[in-house]
Image: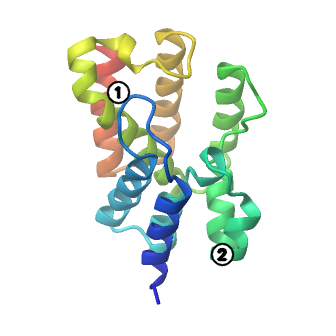
Amino acid sequence: MYELEEDIIHFVFMAFNNLKRAKEDISLAFHSIMVGNMLKNLGCDEEIVYIGYLHDIIEDTKYTYEDLLNRYGKKIADGVLVLSENQNIANYVERKKEFLNRLEKINDDILIVEIADKLQNLISDYEQYKIYGKDFLVTEASNFDELKWYYLELKKLFNSRISNNQLLKRYNEIVYEYFES
């Protein structure tokens, strides 16, 4: 029988079975596990770490809020739900604006999960960014300027709410290199 954290990690790999990152030939589960590990290394509460592991489940897999609620309880399911973008909004900028508005209302512990998520995305892209430049970063956005807008809006939000956080320090450094230097 698995302990809860082991069960969550197993579930993440099961949920992302055969799904790959857009820019790498690697399982989407890698990203989720890395986000959870960043939060664990930061010393976050277990539930925040678990939300980090599960943060993309609703957004990127067949599993729903109800699945997470039944499996892991309301607090974890609610945390994952609030970090899931509304995929019914097709326009990138409109979807991101709606998501940013939601992020403004969440508690700081959950916001730190989003910092870890975005930082891990940027770290994963670093080697390819150094080779191919800024256009490599663009996937969902229509162009680099949209992506830059989004990451700078996140930076403003994160820095207005969170202080003295190692993940945010790293986020600020890499966002500066990608979008502001």
* Mark 2 nearby-residue class (10 Å; few <14, some 14–19, many ≥20): some
Q: Which residue is mark 1?
A: 175
For the point 71% across and 20% down, which residue is it?
91
For the point 54% across and 14% down, which residue is it?
146
Mark 2, mark 1: which one is toward the viewer? 2
Left/right of residue 131 with respect to residue 76 in the rendered view: left
In this rendered view, identify the residue nearer to me: 142 or 157.
142
Label 1 sits on a secondary structure element that is helix
**Number of numbered labels in the structure image:** 2
* One can see residue 67 in this view: yes
Left/right of residue 90 with respect to residue 155 in the rendered view: right
In this rendered view, identify the residue nearer to me: 126 or 175.
126
Disc 2 marks a residue whose amino acid type is Arg
Disc 1 marks a residue whose amino acid type is Val
Label 2 sits on a secondary structure element that is helix
* One can see residue 104 in this view: no
The relative height of residue 84 versus residue 151 in the rendered view (above or below) is below
Q: Which residue is mark 2?
A: 71
* Mark 1 nearby-residue class (10 Å; few <14, some 14–19, many ≥20): many
